[in-house]
Amino acid sequence: MVTEILIVDPVEPDRTAIARAAACLRRGGLVAFPTETVYGLGAHALDRTAVARLFEVKGRPPNDPLIVHVAALEEAAALVTRVPDAARDLAARFWPGPLTLVFPRAEAVPTDVTAGLDTVAIRVPAHPVAHALLVAARLPIAAPSANLFSRPSPTRAIHVVDDLGGRIDMVLDAGPTSVGVESTVLDLTQDPPVVLRPGAVTVEALRGVVPSVRVRPPGAAASGAMASPGLLDRHYAPRTPMTLYDGRSASTRAALVEAIAEAVAAGRRVGLLATSEHALPVRHLPVVIADLGSERDPGQVASRLYAALRELDAAQLDLIVAQGPETDEGLWRAVHDRLRRAATRVVGS
Ligand code: TXA
Ligand code: MG
């Protein structure tokens, strides 16, 4: 199959292109589109055949539930059995935006979408292209990140084409996404609500609206049969082995520099994924450096992260070395989470 690529303006998307993509979705097609976080691969959420095809082309295991995207909170009403007060408050503050809320699922949502769960994850994206598509299609759109299963999420249309070209109907290319890491997933079916996946909306910001919000410890298994984000530990994995030097101690940092120097001396090709500050000590070595920008700008680090992982992965290296963040505050929590999941080995804390 030929994947059609439509270039659209990220701020004022062309109506004809949006109408074509919407019609394609309504027919059961698969359309990749930008959101403010990463590109999503959309399917008509109530069309079981389309949803089945979506799982198939991604190579996604059927026990990993999808997020359903809608244009506004009111459109979630048909998909859930209850809208808790906290949901209204959070939606008023963060929607449209990079927050996904987990609700009790209404019958209307096929269990294929939710991996058999009696809950459903819903988000109202802020990207003008995603919004225009939802309005034009007049459908709830199920959309996971538009990457092959276990590859880093796509932050540019070319990443989507690299992974899924020839297997999906259409890609709306509106340039790089701005946020770069996925939405925060917050489970509102538990009281107090629990962050299942740290993301673009920080825990601190959520607590500004709902002070009782809890965070699931990294690596903690999901309860019962519930498939959830942390369950698949190596979710964002590059193909090249990657060691994460985690922890802020001087010894961990020294170990990183030493490991790189040793690998280089042994004739191995090494890539480094780090902030500009942390890349400094190895600048003199023959290392491929993916510079994530300054420690002072976690927003930029997040927005560059997945493209940097893909670049290093394409560079024919023997080893990728990554530097863990110095803090878990704000957006660093999400960056840290993604680095941990991408790593084949973690040194330090
Ligand atoms: O930013 C994002 O969230 C992007 C854009 C495209 O919206 N989407 C995204 O989708 O990252 P995906 O499929 O790659 O990740 C969705 C996460 C999964 O880890 C899944 O386990 C969790 O949301 N999830 C979905 N439904 C759930 C549910 N009912 N209960 C708990 N977790 C759920
Ligand atoms: Mg994903």
Image (tube, rainbow, N blue to C red):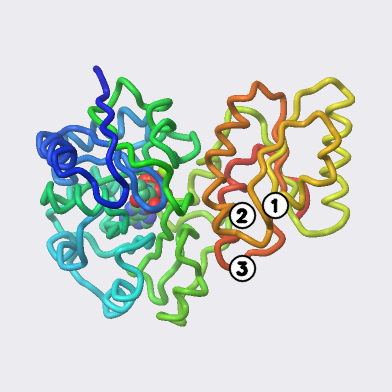
Mark 2 lies on residue? 336
Assign a secondary structure to mark 2: helix
> 253 and 129: which one is in front?
129
Disc 2 residue type?
His
Q: Residue 188 appears in which quarter of the rendering?
A: bottom left
Disc 3 residue type?
Glu
- Please tell me which of labels 2 and 1 falls first in the chain: 1
> 303 and 69: which one is in front?
303
Mark 3 lies on residue? 329
Position of residue 313 measured from the top left corner of the image (x, y, whole percent) = 60, 29
Q: Judge: label 1 CB < 8 Å from ligand 2.
A: no
| Placement of the C terminus among the 4 image quadrants | bottom right
Q: Do the residues labelled 2 and 1 touch (CB within 8 Å)?
A: yes
Mark 1 lies on residue? 324
In this rendering, is residue 61 above or below 231?
Answer: above
Position of residue 28 measured from the top left corner of the image (x, y, whole percent) = 14, 34
Q: How many angstroms separate mark 3 from mark 1 (CA)?
A: 13 Å
In this rendering, is residue 179 above or below 14?
Answer: below
Q: Judge: label 3 CB < 8 Å from ligand 1.
A: no
Q: In this view, does 259 lie to the left or right of 94?
A: right
